[in-house]
Amino acid sequence: MKLFIDTNLFVYLNSRIPEEIADKLDEFYANLTQNHELYTDVLVLDELIHVSRRKYGIAQGDTIEFIDDIILPAVRVLPLTFQDYLTAKGIIRQYNLRPSDALHVAVIENNGLQTIVSEDEDFDVLPLKRLWLGG
């Protein structure tokens, strides 16, 4: 299955979190990489660098290294296009999503992906499958 990976999974994988949770996330990500085609977009990478630094104090260089070593070998990074903006505009109006989330959904729709991997329940208002730990 073609899956879109949202920022929160990467932030958790990049952060210092309790070992028990980190092990579950590592196993979850390994399963995703082995059994699915994984995609994300450049906005996720931007959010990852920003949130990792602001919320968890992780140096930007360390997050860039994480992107290069952990994400890029397993995940195809899709660009944002003007068509994605046009699609996102309709999603914002119809579902009242945050602009960045609407852009992610637009990338999903415009690239024929089926599912988003995210803990963000805001996506549940959409006709889009959401996958997260345990379900």
Image: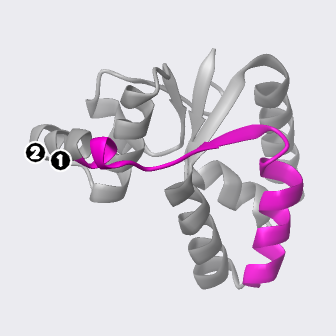
Q: Residues within 10 Å of mark 2 (few under 14, many from 20)?
A: few
Q: Nearer the viewer, residue 56 or 91?
A: 91
Q: Nearer the viewer, residue 23 or 108?
A: 108
Q: Residue at x 17, y 47 (%)?
A: 89
Q: Residue at x 50, y 58 (%)?
A: 43
- Where does the C terminus fall, quadrant-wise? top right
- Where does the N terminus fall, quadrant-wise? top right
In the rendered image, residue 98, in percent from the top left (x then y), is placed at 27, 56
In the rendered image, residue 108, in percent from the top left (x then y), is placed at 44, 32
- The residue segment tinted magenta is 58-85
- Horizontally, residue 120 falls left or right of residue 57, namely left
- Horizontally, residue 110 falls left or right of residue 50, namely left
Q: Secondary structure at mark 2?
A: helix
Can residue 18 be seen by looking at this rendering?
A: no
Q: CA distance from mark 2 to mark 1?
A: 6 Å
**Label of residue 93 in the image:** 2
Q: Residue at x 24, y 38 (%)?
A: 87
Q: Is residue 100 above or below residue 34?
A: below
Q: Residue at x 43, y 50 (%)?
A: 80
- Horizontally, residue 99 falls left or right of residue 112, namely left
> Is residue 70 inside the magenta stretch?
yes
Residue at image mark 1 = 89
Residue that lies at the very extreme toward the top in this rendered image: 1
- Classify residue 99 by image quadrant: bottom left
Residues at discs 2 and 1 in contact (Cβ within 8 Å): yes
